Amino acid sequence: MKKHVLLAFLAVWFVGERLAAQEPADYVDPFIGTTNFGTCNPGAVCPNGMMSVVPFNVMGSDDNRYDKDARWWSTPYEYTNSYFTGFSHVNLSGVGCPELGSLLLMPTTGELDVDYHHYGSKYEKESASPGYYTISLTKYDILAEATATPRSGLVRFTFPEGKSNILLNLGEGLTNESGAYMRKVSETEVEGMKVLGTFCYNPQAVFPIYFVMKVNKVPQASGYWKKQRPMVGVEAEWDKDQGKYKLYTKYAKDIAGDDIGAWFAFDTEKGEQIEVAMGVSFVSIANARENLEKEQHGRHFETVREEARKRWNDDLGRILVEGGTEEQKTVFYTGLYHALIHPNLLQDVNGQYPQMEGDKILTSKGNRYTVFSLWDTYRNLHQLMTLVYPERQLDMVRSMVDMYREHGWLPKWELYGRETLTMEGDPSIPVIVDTWMKGLRDFDVDLAYEAMYKSATSPGKENLLRPDNDDYMNLGYVPLREQFDNSVSHALEYYIADYALAAFAEALGKKEDAKMFRERSLGYRHYYSEEYGTFRPILPDGSFYSPFDPSQGANFEPVPGFHEGSAWNYTFYVPHDVKGLARLMGGKKNFVRKLQMVFDKGLYDPANEPDIAYPYLFSYFKGEEWRTQKLVKELLAKHFTTKPDGLPGNEDTGTMSGWAVFSMMGFYPDCPGVPEYTLTLPAFDRVTIKLNPRYYGKEKLVIEVANPKAKGDYIKAIRLGGKKCGYRISHRDLISAGHLSFEKKP
């Protein structure tokens, strides 16, 4: 009997342990980064999905501080706000300019009121997990839930007894455009189009989003809330009895204009649930309907929600971590979650997508991606995709090359087939080169090189990516021709791109091109001012700009020569020639002293991309690697937490999280375009990265701390595949070894 009792006890214990075991998705907290300018949101989305269903709370009531105009917000959701005006469909995550965030779906009760100042509601019991979001609307006693497929959304409202309404608001949102069109298809379905665009106030970057919306219950009544005269037409119908066509008058069910919307009124029982499905497309209404039907198949909410969660678990589960604290696991997996939102799918289920900066509808052979915030993501996010999701990264590179094929230029900051020209530089080059250098080469390499060469050598007047290329090519630098033209920032980006292009040209056997671009990449020396020990703007006559304060711009105020930062945020931004920069500064000791001073005096900005890799630069110099290990650990603890302000600033479509994910794993790609990593102590005892054997020839890469119980915070030794190695390793060596081990000092 005792044996049977023991076995029964073990069985119960084993089941309990399995139930208690957490999946990667359980560690994700979508509320991290939803305040402190992180501009993330907790809405429902699938990995790299076109659709996201997000609580919209940046439009308030008449007495609310954030009521005046939601369109200045760059996010549909802010954690400290509490006035819900609907679920917005298709949103951006972690960007600095307002866009999208439209097709607002709102439930209400009682008499119909279509003014968002009145119909919004306070809420409570807010909760979110990957692919799911829910709140309780206190004004109406309605439970609102949202989930998503890659191209469609599904919302479920649980109503009280009595009069209930569902509103579709096409007028409000984050986008600066307000025009829309809608047509009633049946009692339970509407379709239409909404104009979006002008991201970062670019008036030309406008595009339509098409939608189909269905409710799963026939309403008692429905209608539009912007009245217009009926559009009358004459149609003919064949009369079999008379043997001829019969003419009759038809009243159209269409409406178009600004600030339009539709309403559906119901008589609900207590606890009655009504589901609302929304399919979208950037091609046509027909495609929006096909996306909806093929991805949801008429399934109900719980089934779609479970499928979204599985998608996230599959993707997040490509990296498994052991050891560390629960908080560190939450920071890590939430960071990986953020890194898998953009870029996102653009093509419909039939493969169609809108041509880049054109009017044609094209068909993709694979996945076509959009939302390329490349000034941010070229620094680490695409390197993460290359390592962990190589099949996806290849499709992203193919998308970028196809944009050149369609438009004549590689993307800079592309948004749903429009080039917004936001930020500076030529950021596609290091992304594509980095991908190729790491062995992912199944794309049109010749066309890619042609595109890079074009942007690197075309005159400034006709150069979309390098508008000041005439000065850059003739002088080796970009002079300050207008007070706030960001000239130094522009040139530093060109130097990095040209260094990557030089390496690419060398590998392709283009020796003369390689020599030219490599020499160009060293032009940063022009900007070094011995007087201040920093980079400094240069005037057209060749003299340095005066008066000059290298700390000016630290608070994002406009400053001559630099974009969103001070000279200190840019002076060490020469990742392709760190030791050359050190020589320029008078040697290793001066370089290290000055770089350490940036951290000691609070001049380092963890939310500013140009200096994001600064902590890793110490490791280029023997004996100084400990500084990297110390700073990375401190910065992670200080700036990446489980709170709503748990990001150092704007997420920048996964770039902040990309830094954290790499740093917590113990290595970082500090020079875009160069297939190498700088090492630091991992945050976990063991990290297992599931590799794609098709691209890397093996199934996993293991990173571990050999003596995890040691209390030291610094590295004693590193072994790659069992052999001692230094603090910088190549991508090829890392993958080939398959095992990276750190030994901590006691």
Image (cartoon, rainbow, N blue to C red):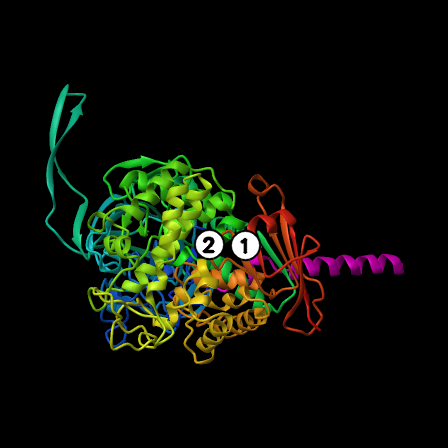
For the residue pair 560 and 234, the one nearer the viewer reads as 560
Q: Residue 77 appears at what percent x and percent y? A: 36, 66
Does residue 398 show up? yes
Q: Residue 213 appears at what percent x and percent y? A: 32, 48
The residue shown at (20%, 52%) is 204
Element type at marker 1? helix
Q: Residue 688 appears at what percent x and percent y? A: 63, 54
Q: Magenta part of the protein: which range?
A: 1-29
The residue shown at (37%, 49%) is 517
The residue shown at (41%, 60%) is 43
Q: In which quarter of the image is residue 452?
A: top left
Q: Is residue 212 above or below residue 569?
A: above
* Dot 1 amino acid type: Leu
Q: Mark 2 and 1 residues: CB-CB less than 8 Å, in contact?
A: yes
State yes or no: residue 561 in magenta: no
Give the alpha-carbon distance from disc 2 to disc 1, as whole Å: 9 Å
**Which numbered tag is attached to residue 316?**
1
* Dot 2 amino acid type: Leu
The image shows a total of numbered marks equal to 2
Element type at marker 2? loop
State yes or no: residue 28 in magenta: yes
Within-10-Å neighbours for mark 2: few <14, some 14–19, many 20+: many
Within-10-Å neighbours for mark 1: few <14, some 14–19, many 20+: many
Image quadrant occupied by the C terminus: bottom right
Q: Residue 333 appears at what percent x and percent y? A: 54, 61
Image quadrant occupied by the N terminus: bottom right
For the residue pair 302 and 133, the one nearer the viewer reads as 133
Q: Which residue lies furthest to the top in this view?
A: 243
Q: Left or right: 56 with respect to 359?
A: right
Q: Name the residue under label 2.
A: 340
